Amino acid sequence: MLSDSKGLNHVAAIGLLLTMLWGGLEVVGALRHGLEFPSSKQEFLDGTSTQSLEKQIDLHLPSRDILIAVDSVVRYKLLRAGGDQVLLGRDGWLFLRDELRPYESALANQTARIAILVKLANFLKQQSVHLLVILVPDKVRIAEAQLPARHLPAHTSLRYQEALQEMQAQGIWTLDLRQALVTAGEPTYYRSDTHWNTRGAGLAANAVAAAVKARGMSLPSTSFATVSAERAVEREGDLIRLMGLSAVSKAWRPLPDMELSSETRQIKPSVTRSGGLLDQVDGPPVVLVGTSYSLRGNFSGQLKQALSAEVLNAAKDGGGFLQATAEYLNDESFQSAKPLLVVWELPERMLTAELTQDTRWIRLIERYCP
């Protein structure tokens, strides 16, 4: 067994050396064609020259994508590694390394973000708008048994519970989704993607509706029906793309998920009028803000059916902790027609991440919550 491992390592090393040699020859060819380098110190400092060089390299290295693909295949097939962003789990499961990454200032980052949530909740309360924060458990928490070690590291194991308790202690209406997603009996997250699947999104939507009902909230009723597709189809996950394997043959990459997608339709369409970025009649009673989770698994559609109410999905793909909320509060549609309820979908891992990515949106939010 040990000799087999050494043999694979030797083959992988040779493959990587050949890839590097190929890349080196491509670079030499690019230099012969002539690349434009920084012409001034300022171009170098402000990053203008870097962006220009990247574009030139892409132009003069036609085999760049092939080089990346070869390197990724060698790493995955021979070294059994997913790269710096993806962790290979058991039984074909893939995980985002950011969900397990320890941050030096994790607690301070979480405290700062929860303070922002408190300010926004108070601001919305003054506008007679309820705020419900649904804390989305990381995939590593829900599919913990599929991790290589079969358990979470110490710095992550209590993160969800501690964040939930702190938010509730600060008076934030918060929904715990762990039980709904863990005890389902079937996978609620994609194997090859960071997000919940259609089943998980539906269970989360039902949990939101139950929480709203328990709160005694009354929403204008609108009927919706969700219809599932007749056949499951292959779905390539974002983690396969992060591994650099999106463009290679299926034989050289992890298996894709098979998904039975669904679509939600309003049974009796409402009358609409034009005006504003988020076009609606008198504003919808419910607005969904958050991240790409709200754009996967037909979550927003299933939420409409679960609530029997119109839901405006203002979530942002790649929007991070604050972008969707900041942009929605800054939009004319919020200014002219307040909803009754804002549902804020918030992934667990974003609470402890560094604050630098949210600086721009924090400044925008401070217009409303100084």
Image (spheres, helix red, strand yellow):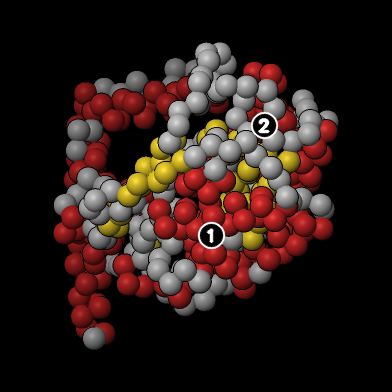
Q: Which residue is mark 1?
A: 138
Callout 1 amino acid: Asp
Callout 2 amino acid: Pro
Left or right of 310 in this view: 127: right
Provide residue 347's location: percent of width, then percent of height: 57, 52
Residue for point 22% across, 83% down:
3
Provide residue 294's location: percent of width, then percent of height: 50, 44
Helix, strand or loop under label 2: loop
Helix, strand or loop under label 1: loop
Q: Residues within 10 Å of mark 1 (few under 14, many from 20)?
A: many
Residue for point 59% across, 51% down:
209
Left or right of 82 in this view: 313: right
Foreground of the two, 23 or 240: 240
Foreground of the two, 210 or 237: 210
Residue for point 66% across, 52% down:
213
Residue for point 51% across, 42% down:
304
Q: Residues within 10 Å of mark 2 (few under 14, many from 20)?
A: many
User: Marks 1 and 2, how far apart in space?
Assistant: 29 Å
User: Which is more N-terminal, label 2 or label 1?
Assistant: 1
Image quarter hosting the C terminus: top right
Provide residue 338's location: percent of width, then percent of height: 69, 27
Provide residue 276's location: percent of width, then percent of height: 57, 16
Image quarter hosting the N terminus: bottom left
Q: Which residue is mark 2?
A: 339
Q: Nearer the viewer, mark 1 or mark 2?
A: 2
Q: Is residue 175 above or below residue 131?
A: below
Q: Is residue 349 visible?
A: no
Foreground of the two, 176 or 83: 176
Left or right of 171 in this view: 355: left
